[in-house]
Amino acid sequence: MTVAASLSITARPAGLIARTKVLWARPVVDVSGIVHEFTWLNTHRFVMRPGTQTITVYFRRRESTGAHARATFEVAPGETIHLLALLQGKGRFTLQMRRDTPGASAGNPGSTTSD
């Protein structure tokens, strides 16, 4: 039996220029080929298979996309990846990732990386 892993993602604008962009665009996350649209500022959770995962975050307007950011990482069974996607004023996403590894103590919640 394989225990699933999970992705928790929040997308938000960073700065005044980025806030104007979100009025006409929706954030999108591609989890290893499975595409999900979601909303700004809310945290959304998705189930993933353990193993190598490629996450792409971008925004979609009526007829175009933009601000693509990509991260590839290994995820363990039962692990939760928390991803914060910040839309910068120059029209690109910055990804900040935190891991919650099963069995990690309260003082050691896993590793933190940024893309």
Image (cartoon, rainbow, N blue to C red):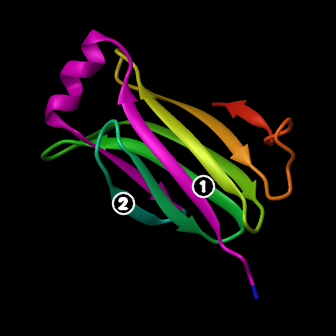
Residue type (three-letter) at the residue carrying disc 2 = His
Q: Is residue 75 left or right of residue 47?
A: right
According to the picture, the residue beneath numbered tag 1 turns out to be 54
Q: Position of residue 15 (x, y in %)?
A: 34, 12
Q: Residue at x 75, y 56 (%)?
A: 74
Q: Is residue 76 left or right of residue 15?
A: right
Q: Residue at x 48, y 65 (%)?
A: 33
Boundaries of the magenta span: 2-31
Which residue is farthest bottom? 1
Q: Which mark is residue 19?
A: none
Q: Residues within 10 Å of mark 2 (few under 14, many from 20)?
A: few
Q: Residue at x 38, y 42 (%)?
A: 58
Which residue is farthest top? 16
Q: Earlier in the sequence, mark 1 or mark 2?
A: 2
Q: Is residue 35 left or right of residue 20?
A: right
* Figure quadrant of residue 89: top left
Q: Position of residue 51 (x, y in %)?
A: 74, 66
Residue type (three-letter) at the residue carrying disc 1 = Thr
Q: Which mark is residue 36?
A: 2
Residue 108 higher or lower than 47, as above or below: above
Label 1 secondary element:
strand
Q: Position of residue 11 (x, y in %)?
A: 40, 37
- Marks 1/2: CA–CA distance: 14 Å
Q: What is the count of numbered marks? A: 2
Q: Position of residue 112 (x, y in %)?
A: 74, 34
Q: Residue at x 27, y 11 (%)?
A: 16
Q: Are marks 1 and 2 in contact (CB under 8 Å)?
A: no
Residue 34 belongs to magenta span: no
